[in-house]
């Protein structure tokens, strides 16, 4: 059974004339008649009472008309929905970004891009490093916003996935402040609020502690590597955590948090896939290349 057989049948229901439906369907009357017969053969019953004039439907034909119209309407709606989604997908710029960058960097950076290009349709996957890289590599996202440090290299092909440096950030040890002084010091008695050991920020904060000769006692591990959760723990006075400066700069300025040092600098990078060459993607890439480097102040 072909979809056109259903369309033929619905046309015949409307015109009650083989000749008029054949003209409307742009086929000969004999070909149109064969297609109706093929539908009846497939269903195993007669749909048309050919003994009457004008042509009328059998009881089975009247029952099947509702089904045929419903199937065609559903298919047309589904096709229109898929086409609309495809057009929206073509217009939408998709980003995968680390949670911290999606919250503290992306909104203002996007403003700068839109000053150059005008309003954009965007969607953002805010996730951990592994899932964001996977989204870029598998073609689900046009761009990846991530931190970079040589101590924690990204294992992706630089030719397939070129990058530009958008700016710089610091990962620093932070403590809650009370009366202008840190509640904790960087010593062995202090509780460390840690990221999962396999996350980017977990590996980089371990590197920062190591190069600064800092040894703390881990009291809490945030396995999903969301820096915002550790920030809330630090503000509540549970211990010390290494946090991106871009995330806590207002808390540092207001005196709610203290910078304990033991910091490392890291780049903010935007990667793209060389395979994704839509005009809108290229325009965002070119506009990003013209922006001055981000400053945390």
Image (cartoon, grey):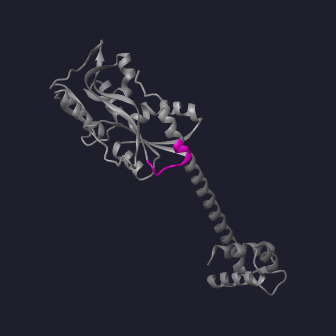
130 or 157: nearer the eye?
157
Q: Is residue 274 magenta?
A: yes
228 or 295: nearer the eye?
295
Q: Is residue 159 left or right of residue 179?
A: right
- Which quadrant of the structure image shows residue 283? top right
User: Residue 135 placed where, x, y %?
Assistant: 41, 49
Give the main secondary structure of the magenta stretch. Answer: loop
At x 25%, y 33%, the residue is 205
User: Residue 247 placed where, x, y %?
Assistant: 38, 28
- Which quadrant of the structure image shows residue 165? top left
User: Residue 111 placed where, x, y %?
Assistant: 53, 31
At x 63%, y 58%, the residue is 80
- 171 shown above or below 280: above
Total residue callouts: 0
* Residue at the top extreme, as displayed: 179
Q: Quadrant of the C terminus?
A: top left
Report the span colored magenta: 273-282
24 or 297: nearer the eye?
297
- 230 shown above or below 280: above
Q: Is residue 104 magenta?
A: no
At x 22%, y 21%, the residue is 184
Q: Is residue 177 left or right of residue 103?
A: left
Q: Quadrant of the N terminus?
A: bottom right
* Residue at the right extreme, as displayed: 53
- Which quadrant of the structure image shows residue 199? top left
- 85 shown above or below 260: below
User: Residue 212 placed where, x, y %?
Assistant: 19, 26
Q: Is residue 116 left or right of residue 168?
A: right
At x 41%, y 24%, the residue is 295
């Amino acid at each position: 059974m072909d979809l056109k057989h259903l369309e033929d049948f619905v046309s015949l229901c409307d015109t009650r004339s083989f000749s008029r439906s054949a003209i409307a369907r742009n086929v000969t009357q004999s070909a149109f008649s064969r297609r109706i017969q093929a539908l009846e053969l497939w269903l195993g019953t007669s749909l048309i009472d050919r003994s009457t004039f004008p042509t009328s439907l059998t009881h089975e034909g009247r029952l099947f008309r509702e089904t045929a119209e419903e199937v065609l309407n559903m298919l047309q709606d589904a096709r229109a929905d898929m086409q609309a989604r495809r057009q929206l997908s073509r217009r939408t710029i998709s980003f995968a970004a680390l949670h911290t960058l999606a919250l503290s960097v992306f909104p203002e950076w996007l403003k700068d891009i839109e000053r150059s290009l005008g309003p954009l349709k965007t969607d953002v996957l805010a996730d951990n490093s592994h899932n964001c890289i996977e989204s870029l590599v598998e073609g689900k996202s046009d761009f990846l916003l991530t931190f970079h440090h040589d101590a924690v290299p990204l294992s992706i092909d630089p030719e397939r996935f070129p990058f530009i440096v958008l700016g710089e950030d610091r990962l620093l040890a932070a403590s809650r402040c009370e009366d202008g002084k840190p509640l904790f010091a960087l010593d062995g008695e202090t509780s460390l609020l840690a990221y999962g050991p396999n996350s980017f920020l977990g590996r980089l904060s371990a590197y920062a502690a190591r190069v600064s000769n800092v040894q703390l006692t881990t009291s809490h591990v945030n396995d999903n590597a969301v820096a915002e959760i550790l920030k809330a723990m630090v503000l509540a006075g549970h211990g010390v955590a290494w946090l991106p400066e871009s995330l806590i700069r207002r808390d540092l300025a207001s005196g709610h948090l203290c910078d304990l040092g033991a910091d490392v600098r890291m780049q903010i990078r935007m990667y793209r896939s060389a395979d994704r060459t839509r005009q809108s993607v290229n325009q965002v890439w070119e506009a990003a290349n013209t922006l001055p480097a981000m400053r945390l102040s």
